[in-house]
Image: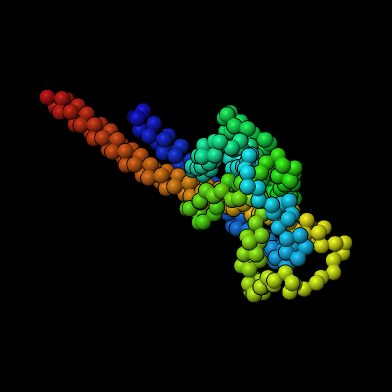
């Protein structure tokens, strides 16, 4: 009978865990929808900034802006690693960390500093033999474009002042709830051709844009001046690219957690079925044993 009690207790425990995993799956699905909505809302802003830059940047400062200058001699790099704050999402965070370690090993000849966004990356690299420049954690509960601007300013300052010659971003690109692809995005220097491509892909009007030759460009009047406008737009474009990477990573995390919790719920159902079958067999064996004992006792009394 004690064995039956143990099995029944296990069934009850697994059923309670199944309720938790099912609830976490529903919460992750709701957060995933919100993350996707945030990505869709960011797209018009990024397209608009890229369109303005494609029109005004070439006629003002061309590719001579500090954020656009490609440095041939890469003496130092800065890698922004975006992870989550929480677990229970399968191998999501581990995939990003392993990919980052591989990238660091490949560029071992070039000193690389890390900026971590998310608690998991900070805790992991804090104990590793890497140069951790700074970290940002607990940002996801109140995530906004202002957060991306503050991080982008720190990265931009390090690049413009010559502390680093290249800035990369490692994050998980959202493909579907069951597929997240770890990606390394070259963030700085910004590339003028990428801005043109973003502008051309943004909207139907933007796709029809043809950047005229230098001598054929229209003349615009700006207030206060075109350089100030382009400086502000480039900083916003940089923050927009970083914010998009963060949102992609957030959506990937929720998708991975939803998939992991769905698998855990299914595994709990399978385990409950096996335990129930084991319980029924043990109960049947116990009843059979009792019947045999009663019959044997009756036969003994007759004798």
> On the image, which quarter does residue 1 sit in?
top left
Q: x%, y% of residue 84?
A: 59, 43
Please name the residue shown 52% across and 48% down the image: 182
Which part of the image, by quadrant, shows the C terminus?
Answer: top left
Whether residue 154 is visible: no
**Foreground residue, 262 or 161?**
161
> On the image, which quarter does residue 301 sit in?
top left
The residue lying furthest to the right in this view is 224
Where 209 falls versus 18 (above or below)? Answer: below
**Foreground residue, 14 or 184?**
184
Does residue 150 appear to the left or right of 179 in the view shown? right
Q: x%, y% of residue 26?
A: 54, 52
Whether residue 228 is visible: yes
Q: x%, y% of residue 154?
A: 73, 43
Please name the residue shown 15% across and 28% down the image: 299
> On the image, which quarter does residue 83 sit in?
top right
Please name the residue shown 25% across and 31% down the image: 290
């Amino acid at each position: 009978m004690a064995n039956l009690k143990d099995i029944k207790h296990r069934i009850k425990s697994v059923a309670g865990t199944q309720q938790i995993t099912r609830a976490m799956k529903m919460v992750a699905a709701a957060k995933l929808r919100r993350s996707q909505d945030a990505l869709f809302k960011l797209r018009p802003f990024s397209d608009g900034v890229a369109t303005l830059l494609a029109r005004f940047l070439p006629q003002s400062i061309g590719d001579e802006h500090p954020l656009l200058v490609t440095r041939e001699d890469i003496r130092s790099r800065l890698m922004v690693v975006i992870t989550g704050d929480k677990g229970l999402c399968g191998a999501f965070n581990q995939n990003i960390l392993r990919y980052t370690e591989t990238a660091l090993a490949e560029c071992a000849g070039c000193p690389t500093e890390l900026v971590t966004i998310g608690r998991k990356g900070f805790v992991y690299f804090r104990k590793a033999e890497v140069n951790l420049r700074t970290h940002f954690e607990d940002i996801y509960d109140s995530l906004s474009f202002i957060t991306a601007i503050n991080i982008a300013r720190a990265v931009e300052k390090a690049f413009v002042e010559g502390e680093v010659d290249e800035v990369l971003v490692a994050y998980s690109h959202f493909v579907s709830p069951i597929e997240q692809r770890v990606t390394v995005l070259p963030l700085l220097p910004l590339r003028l051709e990428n801005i043109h491509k973003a502008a051309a892909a943004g909207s139907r009007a933007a796709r029809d844009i043809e950047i005229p030759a230098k001598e054929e460009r229209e003349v615009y009047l700006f207030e206060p001046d075109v350089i100030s406008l382009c400086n502000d737009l480039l900083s916003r474009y940089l923050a927009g690219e970083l914010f998009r990477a963060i949102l992609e990573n957030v959506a990937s995390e929720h998708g991975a957690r939803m998939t992991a919790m769905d698998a855990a719920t299914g595994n709990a159902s399978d385990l409950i079925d096996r335990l129930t079958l084991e319980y029924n067999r043990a109960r049947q064996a116990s009843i059979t044993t009792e019947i045999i004992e009663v019959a044997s006792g009756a036969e003994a009394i007759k004798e």
